[in-house]
Image: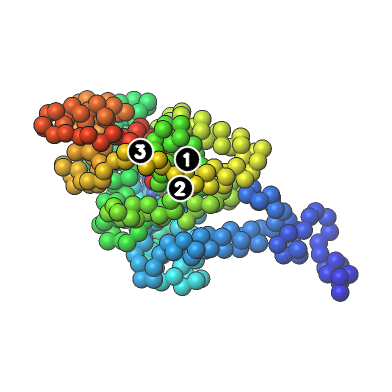
Amino acid sequence: MASVETAAKPRGGRFCTVCNDRRAALKRPKTLEQICKECFYAVFEDEIHRVIVDNHLFKRGERVAIGASGGKDSTVLAYVMSELNRRHDYGLDLFLLSVDEGITGYRDDSLETVKRNEIQYGLPLKVVSYKDLYGWTMDEIVKLIGLKNNCTFCGVFRRQALDRGAALLKVDKLVTGHNADDIAETVLLNILRGDIARLSRCTSIITGEDGPIPRCKPFKYTYEKEIRLDYFSTECIYSPNAYRGFAREFIKDLERIRPRAILDIITSGEDFRIATYTKMPEQGNCERCGYISSQKWCKACVLLDGLNRGLPKMGISRTRGLDNERNQDTGGTNGTKNLQSKQCGSLDF
Ligand SMILES: Nc1ncnc2c1ncn2[C@@H]1O[C@H](COP(=O)(O)OP(=O)(O)OP(=O)(O)O)[C@@H](O)[C@H]1O
């Protein structure tokens, strides 16, 4: 029997450690297992299915928006979500939701990918734009403010735009393509910034359950390298966020030496406990637009106010001072230490 099997196997190279039948085509970045392409896709999709089931991410009948940027992570997410929904009969109503930040030569290109996904996977697409929501495109903001702080505007506006788009679609949940590398990087950055509020929630697979629309991250344990095996890379042309870039490179260096490092950082983040005496921000609503905020005005309104008054740097990183100023203006008080208003909106999932 053994000799028959051996005779049927292809000559040369290692065999797939899963099927032990086909020749291994790649080494899994996460486990270093040698595996064939067919088994890789099966194992990859099965792992996401397990994460979805074990974490009770969805309930039958729910409407779920997939945050679709046209980049590799969310493109794979759109494929995997529609495939698993069909294969395992989750009973979900899936939608694609894209935010058009107004970045010529970047988002207009990737929106074309999303439009292709709309047809490929048969998922209805909703596009919301910064121009319509805020009156500004990122091209216009960058023209005014330059490259240095533009990620702050983009991150804060995108977060709110996704919530607004999700509300228009009347969905129960929003899923994003944040992967294990993104989460490990965010744990590290929140430690480096001493941002306890974000550190405490950035490893949660579901966030915002107390906010307008809960967000889920089915790729929480999925390595970026595995998602991107078959996909091209699209980097934002206005993305000079050096601090996050260093954290990213540091994590990639650690991964080269010890592939488990990414999962270990996530586990460490999950296991942090916040001291009971640490004051956390109190969640309320923005007095201007009604969006969730721990301050009188949400960060998007502060930034927008600065833009519209021709003072675009007003809302950047000095939010604490500004809020105090605004509190004085309006006669309000704000005793809570502001742990949320750190630079770089993309830190907040
Ligand atoms: N313009 C957008 N429209 C809709 N969803 C978005 C948009 N930008 C980001 N997202 C969502 O947030 C996730 C993380 O986005 P981020 O820009 O950090 O990175 P990324 O890792 O390059 O992801 P992607 O490859 O999907 O663009 C995306 O996977 C997507 O689900």
Quarter assignment of residue 3: bottom right
Quarter assignment of residue 197: top left
Disc 3 to disc 2, how far (Cα)? 19 Å
Q: 10 Å neighbourhood of mark 3: few (<14), some, or many (≥20)?
A: few
* Observer-nearest of 12 and 57: 57
Q: Where 223 sits versus 309, above or below?
A: below
Residue on which the image places disc 1:
187
Quarter assignment of residue 133: top left
Q: Quadrant of the N terminus?
A: bottom right
Residue drawn at (32%, 61%) of the image: 172
Q: Check residue 203 in the rendering and tell me which mark sits there, or answer none.
A: 2
Q: With 195 as the anchor, is 231 left or right in this view?
A: right
Q: Amino acid at mark 3?
A: Thr
Residue drawn at (57%, 63%) of the image: 46
Q: How is the image coloured?
A: rainbow
Asked if the residues shown at circle 1 and circle 3 are in contact, with their CB atoms under 8 angstroms apart, the answer is no
- Between disc 3 and disc 2, the foreground one is 3
